[in-house]
Image (cartoon, grey):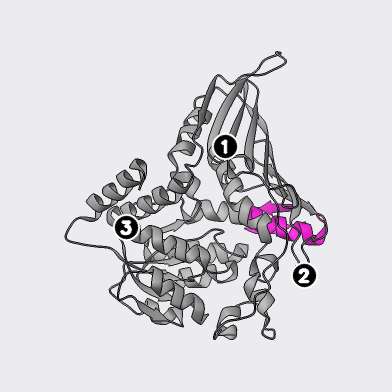
Amino acid sequence: MHRREFLVAASAASVLGASRKIRAGIIGSGGRGRLLTAEFKEIGVDMAAVADVYEPNLAAGLKTASTGAEGYSNYKKLLEDKTLDAVIVATPDHWHAQMTIDAVEAGKDVYLEKPLAHTIADGFRIIEAVRRTRRVVQVGTQRRSFDLFQEAKQVMDSGQVGDVRLVNSWWYNYTGSVRTRPLEGKLDWEQWLGPAPKRALDPARFRNWYWYWDYSGGLLVGQAAHVVDAIHWMMNSSYPLAVTCTGGRANVEGVEVPETASMSIEYPENYLGVFTLGYKAMPYNGYNDQCKQFHGSKARFDVGREWWALYPQSNDLEMKPSLEKKRPGSFASATRMHIRNFLDCIESRKDPNATVEMGQATNIVLCMAMDSMRTGRRLKWNQAARRVES
């Protein structure tokens, strides 16, 4: 364990107290779910329950969880366990809303993987339920707890960048093909579909749900959920004025959602945000695969995954940063810091760093981007009426 990670774990342990250990359950123990299970457990949480509709995932989740954890094939049974303080929701996007609402109604605090929801209406349903039940819900946009990004936020707030009218951002990498492995155990397909349109069992959809409109918006949503949220945070903004999104045809065989796309977001704070996804580019080291460029009247501020740099206005051929921070390999600590913030808020009952309202502001942009791409229209957001207009 690195020193920074040790301090996070030690701090969480002191907050929770030696006599009481937080008990939590995981709903959705696929790859991300098991990673979060391991992280919560490492910090000191008793991962006492696992729910998954696919038997191999359930077995793997129980193996990762704490000794003696209970397994459930239906998440509602997990929520009946009154000894659980919190649950992690790490399922496909189309289940986020109902599971989160059911969890807070059952008296649980929730760590919810991004995006907040799969529709705008579901996002507002989450907000209503969370505020009515007074539960703590942390949306999994971990940059808001990452100390490197918190330093970047201080630079943005210092005034050194000046007025920003344009933010360019991107995430580049390579996707070759989807998973074609057959099912290796029992799957409750009807439960997995849940609120999505009914259809015959399709292992390809189960394995690659990210790439089908019924369940997600692909990497466009998955990656923009982080980038757009970070832009909102840095720019002190929330709901958009309008969103336009275009994408090429899907170049990954057998899927619906394009891996190459670009969205343009107009904001009432008088700036334009642009996010471009290119997952048929060459593979990049994670240090170099993404960036947010804030083009200010005084300086350009670049914020990457594990670095940031401030470039004051200059006519020099080679611009040099006046401030910069580079921490290669540090991003794994962001999730641990985000979990620690969630655990702190379970005890204090304060709002976490990534509230449901913040998640909904980003969710509105993402849902509008999906609709814009599919309809070919520039879509406007009517905040007073809380609806999309063309």
Would you say residue 384 is visible in this rendering?
Answer: no
Q: Residue under circle 2? A: 254
Label 1: element kind: helix
Label 3: element kind: helix
Q: Earlier in the sequence, mark 3 or mark 2?
A: 2
Q: Position of residue 30 (x, y in %)?
A: 51, 69
Q: Report the amino acid beneath label 1.
A: Met
Give residue 167's mark: none
Q: Report the amino acid beneath label 2.
A: Gly
Question: What is the magenta range?
Answer: 364-390
| Disc 2 packing (10 Å; few <14; some 14–19; many ≥20) | some
Q: Position of residue 91 (x, y in %)?
A: 53, 69
Q: Position of residue 115 (x, y in %)?
A: 57, 59
Give the alpha-carbon distance from disc 1 to disc 3, as whole Å. 28 Å
Residue at the spot x=62%, y=52% of the render? 223
Give residue 346's mark: 3
Give residue 235's mark: 1
